[in-house]
Image (tube, rainbow, N blue to C red):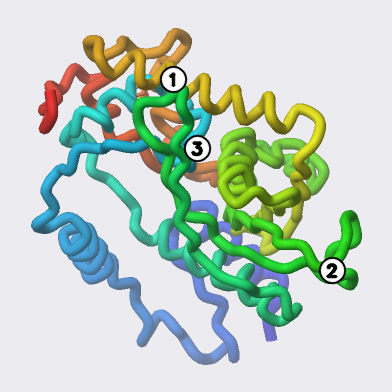
């Protein structure tokens, strides 16, 4: 039986950063035959990193990514377009895997609802104001049904963009977390898909990874929809204008202590420990030289 003392001991061990098992039943010591394998896990992760990058040659980007609508850093865009070799190759591929799994689960819900039409539809928008096209992949196309689409008419093709997210900024509860959604860049991505497929409605389907909760937003082609699209194009035009010039400086206000340059764990025992950085962080904030494949 687990006693209050057991729970206290576990809480103390966790607070100290030690692995802690509750012996259950009490006379069996799990630590006598269970141990952590950090070196093996690190070797597997390093191999993953190697396998995902080996043999890759830089390819000149010749399009804007729909997912880059309202990119937070023009300097990073410039470096990407010039084929900069990352100074901080600390990509966590597990995060991508988790995102893909969550997307599958969201798609599955629409399959079960009998609404599924297609996944991963590619788009290419050639806006006359831009020199390069905008490309992207829409997560899911569904057909609306009265039982599930209560805010607009039945039997309409609808875009769905699935996004996994986490508790950023959420310390006080569900309503605080929801206040940060939906993100402007996610709405931008969906607006581009709706424009390309001439759709009247689209959904942003969010999944909170830490709390396993979902929230859905409806985007309708009305109000400032077209002005928002124009604002996206304007941002891409600014990117194109900067590409012909020298490497832009670090944007004003970026001190290398916050997103999108660096981000931190919100775990109480890992506060102030970076959980990840932009792939050009050391170039920007530690003066590491940058190598450009396409200067
Ligand atoms: S480290 Fe920050 S300033 Fe530098 S490219 Fe990345 S996001 Fe931009």
10 Å crowding of disc 1: few (<14), some (14-19), many (20+): some
10 Å crowding of disc 2: few (<14), some (14-19), many (20+): few
Q: What is the distance, in whole Å, between disc 1 and disc 3 at their CAs?
A: 38 Å
User: Does 112 sit left or right of 22 as displayed?
Assistant: right
At 68% across and 24% down in the image, what residue appears?
227
Secondary structure of residue under mark 1: helix
Q: Which mark is residue 148?
A: 2
Look at the image and tell me in which quarter the C terminus lies.
top left
Quarter location, residue 43: bottom left
Q: Earlier in the sequence, mark 2 or mark 1?
A: 2
Please, which residue is most extreme toward the front here?
A: 128
Q: What is the distance, in whole Å, between disc 2 and disc 3 at their CAs?
A: 41 Å
Q: Which mark is residue 136?
A: none
Q: Position of residue 165 (x, y in %)?
A: 59, 50
Q: Position of residue 292 (x, y in %)?
A: 13, 28
The image shows residue 116, relative to residue 247, as above or below, that is below
- Image quarter for ligand 1 equals top left
The answer to whether marks 1 and 3 mark residues whose Cβ atoms lie closer than 8 Å is: no
Q: Earlier in the sequence, mark 1 or mark 3?
A: 1
Q: How many marks?
A: 3
10 Å crowding of disc 3: few (<14), some (14-19), many (20+): few
**Residue holding disc 1:** 237
The image shows residue 236, relative to residue 199, as above or below, that is above
User: Does 282 sit left or right of 270 as displayed?
Assistant: left
Q: Is mark 3 within 8 Å of ligand 1?
A: no
Secondary structure of residue under mark 2: loop
Quarter location, residue 65: top left
Q: Can see residue 166?
A: no
Q: Which mark is residue 271?
A: 3
Q: What is the distance, in whole Å, between disc 2 and disc 1 at their CAs?
A: 39 Å
């Amino acid at each position: 039986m687990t006693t209050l003392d057991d729970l206290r001991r576990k809480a103390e061990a966790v607070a100290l950063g030690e692995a802690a098992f509750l012996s259950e039943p009490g006379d069996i010591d799990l630590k006598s035959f269970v141990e952590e394998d950090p070196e093996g896990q690190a070797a597997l992760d390093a191999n993953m990193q190697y396998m995902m990058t080996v043999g890759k040659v830089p390819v000149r980007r010749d399009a804007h990514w729909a997912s880059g609508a309202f990119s937070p850093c023009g300097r990073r865009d410039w470096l990407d377009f010039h084929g900069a070799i990352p100074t901080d190759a600390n990509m966590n591929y597990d995060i991508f895997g988790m995102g893909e799994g969550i997307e599958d689960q969201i798609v599955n819900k629409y399959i079960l609802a009998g609404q599924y039409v297609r996944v991963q539809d590619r788009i290419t928008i050639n806006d006359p104001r831009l020199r390069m096209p905008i490309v992207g992949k829409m997560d899911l196309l569904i057909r609306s049904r009265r039982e599930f689409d209560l805010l607009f008419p039945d039997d309409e093709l609808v875009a769905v963009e699935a996004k996994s997210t986490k508790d950023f900024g959420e310390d006080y509860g569900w309503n605080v977390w929801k206040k940060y959604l939906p993100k402007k860049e996610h709405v931008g991505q969906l607006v581009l898909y709706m424009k390309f497929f001439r759709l009247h409605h689209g959904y942003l389907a969010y999944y909170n990874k830490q709390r396993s909760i979902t929230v859905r937003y409806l985007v309708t082609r009305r109000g400032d929809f077209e002005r928002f699209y124009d604002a996206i194009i304007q941002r891409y035009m600014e990117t194109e204008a900067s590409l012909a010039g020298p490497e832009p400086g670090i944007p004003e206000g970026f001190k290398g202590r916050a997103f999108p340059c660096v981000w931190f764990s919100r775990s109480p025992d890992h506060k102030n420990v970076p959980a990840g950085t932009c792939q050009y962080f050391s170039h920007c904030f530690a003066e590491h030289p940058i190598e450009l494949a396409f200067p």
